[in-house]
């Protein structure tokens, strides 16, 4: 692992710069590299690096230690969780003003919804599964699905706040709204500080003085949510994710809704990606003499010319008559296999005609 860069260098500030100057510079860089705004592959790593630098330099105590001892002054004294949790208020102040969320958004962007600082993780709602069956015609044209999902929904009485109607949450007096408390331990000549979630508000920074009786303060009740979404043409069997439409939990991110698509077998066509295959039966006479036949497609019937002397299992391609390509323009092809139908029972007259034909070909 490469050594960490100097925090002042990372932010492009100097040691003499004020907290306000550092905050202003971080805001500019955060706007530039926030993963929700910058889609380049290296943006998350840049964002993580500048956020860690800001978390340290925006806190006077941590900044003083860093100025004196560098990275070594923080290692062993603060965990990654301690560094970011201690700067919660600083992040909230910046990001609440430009629509990227506060500390929780930083948390999600840096470490994912179920990840965390130093092993700490937030509870996340369960993923939900919905199974849908589609026909090949649905795949060809696309389909709008209307489904009802049984899940935890916001309580109607408290609108999801968890508070009794007419009341609101209050700032936790134990942690002063920070959601965590610092514990200092003197060990010989060294002082160690740790940060842990506040036990009074369970790390939320606020508490509910009078819980809603309908949901018992959770803000959630069992219910049903109606969802409508379009299944695009060309889709294949598989699992597709609708982010954030899974189960919800108090003070945590929603799970996802997994839509399991199963494309049913077709009575006429077989599918291979965007291409479809159809078997057309022709008689021996048609194979020998040639003929124009009509074959079905996913849109309408098409006339196909069978050439004289067509061999069994010959393939005719109908260009662009297959399924739409998923996620791109154009369509696949339809392949018509000519299956020569050899009768198992012949009349006396048919046998005589075939024998005469055989004699003329010897």
Image: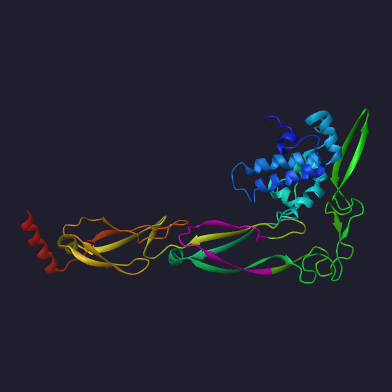
Q: What residue lies at 37% left-to-right and 60% top-to-bottom?
A: 322
Q: What residue lies at 44% left-to-right and 66% top-to-bottom?
A: 141
Residue 284 occupies quadrant: bottom left
Q: Is residue 204 left or right of residue 231?
A: right
Q: What residue lies at 53% left-to-right and 65% top-to-bottom?
A: 230
Colour scheme of the picture: rainbow
- The range drawn in magenta is 224-246
Residue 68 occupies quadrant: top right
Q: Is residue 149 visible?
A: yes
Location of residue 54 in the rendering, given as x and y in whole percent from the top left corner: 76, 41
| Label total for image | 0
Q: Is residue 262 left or right of residue 12?
A: left
Q: What residue lies at 75% left-to-right and 37% top-to-bottom?
A: 13
Q: Is residue 111 visible?
A: no
- Looking at the rendered image, the quarter that the N terminus falls into is top right
Q: Nearer the viewer, residue 254 or 149?
A: 254
Location of residue 342 in the rendering, given as x and y in whole percent from the top left corner: 22, 61
Q: Is residue 298 above or below residue 82?
A: below
Q: Nearer the viewer, residue 351 or 37?
A: 37
Residue 160 occupies quadrant: bottom right
Q: Is 284 included in the stretch rendered in magenta?
A: no
Q: Nearer the viewer, residue 354 or 253?
A: 253
Q: Is residue 359 left or right of residue 317?
A: left
Location of residue 15 in the rendering, given as x and y in whole percent from the top left corner: 80, 34
Q: Is residue 155 above or below residue 336?
A: below
Q: Is 228 included in the stretch rendered in magenta?
A: yes
């Amino acid at each position: 692992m490469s050594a960490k860069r100097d925090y002042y260098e990372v932010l492009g500030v100097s040691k003499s710069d004020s907290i306000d100057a550092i905050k202003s510079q971080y805001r500019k860089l955060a706007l530039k590299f926030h993963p929700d705004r910058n889609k380049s592959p290296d943006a998350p790593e840049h964002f993580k690096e500048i956020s860690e630098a800001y978390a340290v330099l925006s806190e006077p105590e941590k900044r003083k230690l860093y100025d004196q001892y560098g990275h070594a002054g923080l290692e062993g004294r603060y965990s990654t969780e301690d560094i970011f949790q201690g700067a919660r208020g600083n992040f909230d102040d910046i990001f609440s003003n430009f629509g990227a969320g506060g500390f929780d958004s930083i948390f999600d962007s840096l470490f994912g919804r179920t990840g965390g600082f130093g092993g700490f993780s937030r509870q996340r709602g369960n993923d939900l599964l919905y199974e849908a069956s589609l026909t090949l015609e649905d795949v060809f044209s696309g389909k709008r699905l209307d489904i009802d999902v049984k899940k935890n929904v916001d309580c109607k009485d408290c609108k999801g706040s968890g508070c009794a109607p007419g009341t609101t949450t209050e700032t936790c007096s134990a942690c002063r709204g920070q959601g965590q408390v610092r514990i200092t331990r003197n060990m010989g000549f060294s002082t160690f500080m740790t940060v842990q979630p506040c036990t009074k508000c369970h790390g939320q920074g606020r508490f509910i003085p009078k819980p809603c009786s309908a949901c018992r303060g959770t803000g959630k009740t069992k219910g049903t949510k109606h969802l409508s979404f379009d299944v695009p043409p060309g889709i294949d069997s598989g699992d597709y994710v609708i982010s954030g439409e899974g189960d919800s939990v108090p003070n945590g991110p929603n799970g996802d809704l997994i839509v399991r698509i199963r494309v049913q077998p077709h009575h006429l066509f077989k599918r291979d990606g965007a291409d479809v295959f159809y078997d057309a039966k022709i008689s021996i006479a048609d194979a020998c003499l040639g003929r124009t036949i009509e074959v079905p497609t996913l849109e309408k019937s098409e006339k196909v010319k069978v050439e004289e002397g067509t061999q069994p299992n010959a393939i005719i391609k109908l260009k662009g008559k297959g399924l739409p390509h998923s996620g791109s323009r154009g369509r696949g092809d339809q392949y018509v296999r000519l299956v020569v139908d050899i009768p198992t029972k012949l009349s006396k007259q048919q046998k005589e005609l075939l024998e005469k034909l055989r004699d003329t070909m010897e």
